[in-house]
Amino acid sequence: MGYLRSVTRHHEQISPQLNDYMAAHSSPPDAVLLELADETAQRFPDRVGLQIGPEQGTFMTLLARIMGARSAVEVGTFTGYSSICIARGLGERGRLLCCDVSEEWTSVAQRYWQKAGLADRVELRLGPALDTLRALAADPAFDLAFIDADKPGYIGYWEEIVPRTRPGGAILVDNTLSHGRVIDESSHDLNVEQSASLTTTPSPMSASTWCCCR
Ligand SMILES: C[S@@+](CC[C@H](N)C(=O)[O-])C[C@H]1O[C@@H](n2cnc3c(N)ncnc32)[C@H](O)[C@@H]1O
């Protein structure tokens, strides 16, 4: 359990005990993901919470695989944990476009794409994600999208990604509950208000959803 605790992110809506149970009953992260999580925690201790949790990563790998996804986009790559999980689910001929503004954080991701044998599946575009997305062809192309960057940008990312996602494709939007603040009526935080308008989006992510793939 120790190695899982080192990478598991506690969900505030779930008790620590239930969180431990979930981690213990999910497929564990492999050595590459564990090393990445460890390096991220060592080098960026104040930012390690930006990384998705291992069960979320496993969920995304399974979802991509089950859908037979071949083409995906990620907005918000950080040090690469979620991108590795998505790219793995795409299979050998898959392509993942990663959007981020940080050269420092994504340089870590690039090293781990190499270690994971995924470098030829992943393309990184550095710069504001809205510019990157707007510069893409307008035709539907993506099977799967993951939005996990600056919250004020979510509406714009959503508007650019939806028309570029094929019918039947999936769009995952991270942290739309804004740490529970979406139900705080006294909050006038712009991020929260924008997140609130996204909570009805068809994100299949749920802490109580279990997903298995043969
Ligand atoms: C929550 S982290 C992403 C975590 C990542 N998905 C993972 O699992 O490790 C958010 C990322 O969004 C990036 N970001 C913030 N504003 C951005 C923008 N305007 N365009 C592109 N990326 C942005 C940050 O540099 C950061 O790496």
Image (tube, helix red, strand yellow):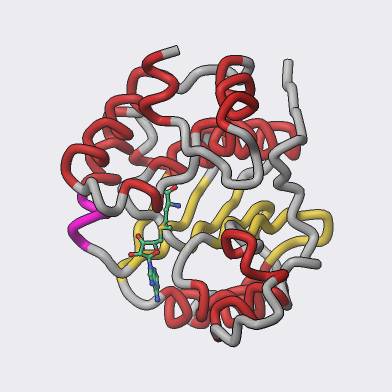
Q: Position of residue 22 (x, y in %)?
A: 63, 24
* Camera-side residue of 35 and 6: 6
Q: Is residue 68 left or right of residue 7?
A: right
Q: In which quarter of the view is residue 124 placed?
A: bottom left
Above/below status of 153 relative to 69:
below
Q: Specify the principal SS of the magenta part.
A: helix
Left or right relative to 125: residue 42: left
**Residue in the foreground of this view, choosing between 86 and 118:** 86
Point out the quarter of the image occupied by ligand 1. bottom left
Quadrant for the N terminus in the image: top left
At x 32%, y 46%, the residue is 48
Residue 100 versus residue 55 in the image, above or below: below
Magenta stretch, residue numbers: 103-107
Seen as rendered, the residue at the extreme top is: 1
Tell me how many marks there are.
0
Q: Residue at x 76, y 55 (%)?
A: 169
86 to the left or right of 40: right
| Residue located at (73% from left, 15% from top) | 214
Point out residue 175 in the picture as x, y percentages from the top left corner.
Answer: 59, 58
* Residue 198 higher or lower than 204, as above or below: below
Q: Is residue 104 magenta?
A: yes
Give the answer, above or below, for where 197 lies relative to 109. below
Tell me residue 91's x, y (percent).
Answer: 56, 32
The residue furthest front is: 186
Classify residue 23 by image quadrant.
top right
Which residue appears at 54% of the width and 79% of the height? Answer: 191
Q: Nearer the viewer, residue 118 or 12?
A: 12
Which x, y percent locates residue 178? 59, 64
Magenta span contains residue 72:
no
